[in-house]
Image: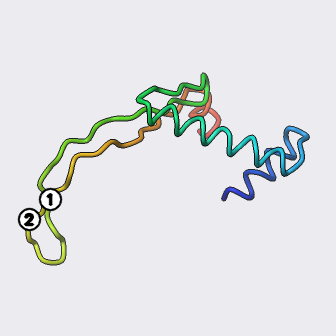
Amino acid sequence: MNKAELIDAIAASAGLSKADSKKALDAFVDATSAALKSGDRLSLVGFGSFSVSKREARTGRNPQTGKEIQIAAKNVVKFKAGADLEGSVN
């Protein structure tokens, strides 16, 4: 499912127009991004939680040449599915 298909599904399920569904989805993405950027954790009960974790710098290897390279430290986004979401998939 891509973004356009998700907007269509939200519009059909919630009885909203596609324009309103797009605005709602964009607002959710913006709010989630802002919360994670500030270091907060976003938890949606039953669905799951988003959090940011720091990945330390490390030494890697270029698979083409075998030469060692330095990989910089960075923040990564993690998602842990909630019990209701896992139950609906299985």
Q: Position of residue 3 (x, y in %)?
A: 68, 56
* Residue at 61 percent of width and 42 percent of height: 29
The residue singled out by tag 1 in the image is 60
Colour option used: rainbow
- Hey, which residue is sitting farthest bottom in the picture? 64
Describe residue 10's horizontal placement relative to residue 68 as left or right.
Answer: right
The one of 10 and 34 positioned closer to us in this rendering: 34
Q: Please rate how many residues cluster around mark 1, counting C-alpha atoms within 10 Å: few if below 14, some from 14 to 19, many from 20.
A: few
* Residue at 47 percent of width and 26 percent of height: 41
Q: Please rate how many residues cluster around mark 2, counting C-alpha atoms within 10 Å: few if below 14, some from 14 to 19, many from 20.
A: few
Describe residue 45's horizontal placement relative to residue 76 as left or right.
Answer: right
The residue singled out by tag 2 in the image is 68
The one of 34 and 88 positioned closer to us in this rendering: 34
Describe residue 15's horizontal placement relative to residue 40 as left or right.
Answer: right
- Hey, which residue is sitting farthest top in the picture? 45
Mark closer to the chain start, 1 or 2? 1
Q: Position of residue 44 (x, y in %)?
A: 59, 26
Distance from the alpha carbon under mark 1 to that under mark 2: 6 Å
Please, what secondary structure does the residue beneath circle 2 have?
strand
The one of 48 and 41 positioned closer to us in this rendering: 41
In terms of image quadrants, where is residue 59? bottom left
* Residue at 52 percent of width and 36 percent of height: 34
Please, what secondary structure does the residue beneath circle 1 have?
strand
- Hey, which residue is sitting farthest left in the picture? 67
In which quadrant is the C terminus drawn? top right
Q: Position of residue 43 (x, y in %)?
A: 54, 25
- Give above or below for 79 relative to 42: below
Residues marked 1 and 2 touching at CB (< 8 Å) = yes
In terms of image quadrants, where is residue 85? top right
Q: Amino acid at mark 1?
A: Gly
